[in-house]
Amino acid sequence: MTVATLAEVLRPAMREGYAVGGLVVLGWEDARAYITAAENAGMPVILQAGPGCRANTPLPLLGAMFRHLAEGASVPVVSLLDHGKTLEECRIALESGFSSVMYDGSRLPLEENIAQTAQAVEMAHRAGASCEGEIGFVGYDAGEESHGTEPEEAGRFARETRVDAMAISVGNVHLQQEAAAVIDRARLDAIQSAAPDVPLVIHGGSGVSEADRVALARETAVAKFNIGTELRQTFGASLRQTLTDDPAVFDRIRILSQAEAAMAVTAEQVIRAFGPS
């Protein structure tokens, strides 16, 4: 059994200068591909169920699926509720077998974000799980604008919530299809100084170049990159290629098995790059 929590995989990563992939899951084939990738790389992996995934599959089913995969894996596997918007969502996730939750209060005023996140942390810790929070706001490509994390607020957030991981906004953006993000290292360094004991998380990791991801993993407290867009791009490209190569194919399992194999290759490349040197 290799079910792990965020704290169990991120603290060694921060200490030893590497990062762990928080890979965005949309279905069974994705999750299985990521386990294959992690086992091939000999790395831990974080299976993430975000709002899009939860819109199509109920949390209790996702919790059972993730735990089933984790228990059969040869590497540590974290099952994470990503961008949980309410404490009730966090409660359901923990009761459904998730080993960690991310409470997203980034759109709330600071005081409310701290208060709500602290409750999520307490709930997770009572369940033997970990909790990630977000301070500042990571925006969306062609959507809501980011609000950079203020180092002083980050230090207070870390102290008062006792989060096991802290998502920050330092130039990273969700849903970027190109590696165009420019990371504000001065802001990141100041955040790290204000909260030296907390692993940092970069959401929108697909928009950060591989070279920058490696440098951040090696040189800073960033211990987790959320990766989704580039994996979905691999899925779409594989799907189109399979249907082009054989226009008569109609069997779902045959079609998706090709995409699963392609996603496993991409995921392995991603997590190896910022893994232990």
Image (spheres, rainbow, N blue to C red):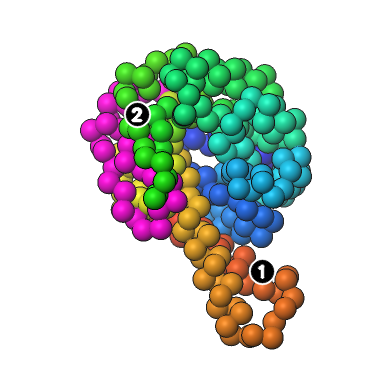
Pointer 2 or 1: first along the chain: 2
What residue is pinned by disc 2? 149
In the figure, residue 80 lies in which quadrant?
A: top right
**Could you tell me if the residues under marks 2 and 1 are in contact, i.e. CB atoms within 8 Å?**
no
Please give the range of residues in magenta.
169-197
Residue 70, image x, y percentages = 68, 45
In the depicted structure, whether residue 165 falls above or below residue 250: above
Q: Nearer the viewer, residue 15 or 110?
A: 110
Residue 16, image x, y percentages = 40, 37
Identify the amino acid type marked 1. Answer: Leu
- Residue at coordinates 49% horizontally, 21% vertically from top-left? 113
- Residue at coordinates 44% horizontally, 33% vertically from top-left? 167
Image side of residue 182 versus residue 36, left or right: left
In the depicted structure, whether residue 191 falls above or below residue 215: above
Image side of residue 241 versus residue 249, left or right: left
Image side of residue 239 versus residue 170, left or right: right
In the figure, residue 14 lies in which quadrant?
A: top left
Q: Say which of marks 2 and 1 sits in front.
A: 2
- Residue at coordinates 36% horizontally, 43% vertically from top-left? 172
Residue 72, image x, y percentages = 72, 49
Instruction: Indicate the quadrant containing the N terminus: top left, top right, bottom left or bottom right.
Output: top right
In the depicted structure, whether residue 243 falls above or below residue 77: below
Q: Which mark is residue 104?
A: none
Identify the amino acid type marked 2. Answer: Thr
- Residue at coordinates 59% horizontally, 55% vertically from top-left? 34
Q: Label 1's element?
A: helix
Q: Is residue 52 visible?
A: yes
What residue is pinned by disc 1? 256
Secondary structure mostly seen in the magenta stretch: loop
Q: Is residue 44 covered in magenta?
A: no
Residue 182, image x, y percentages = 27, 46
Q: Is residue 8 visible?
A: no
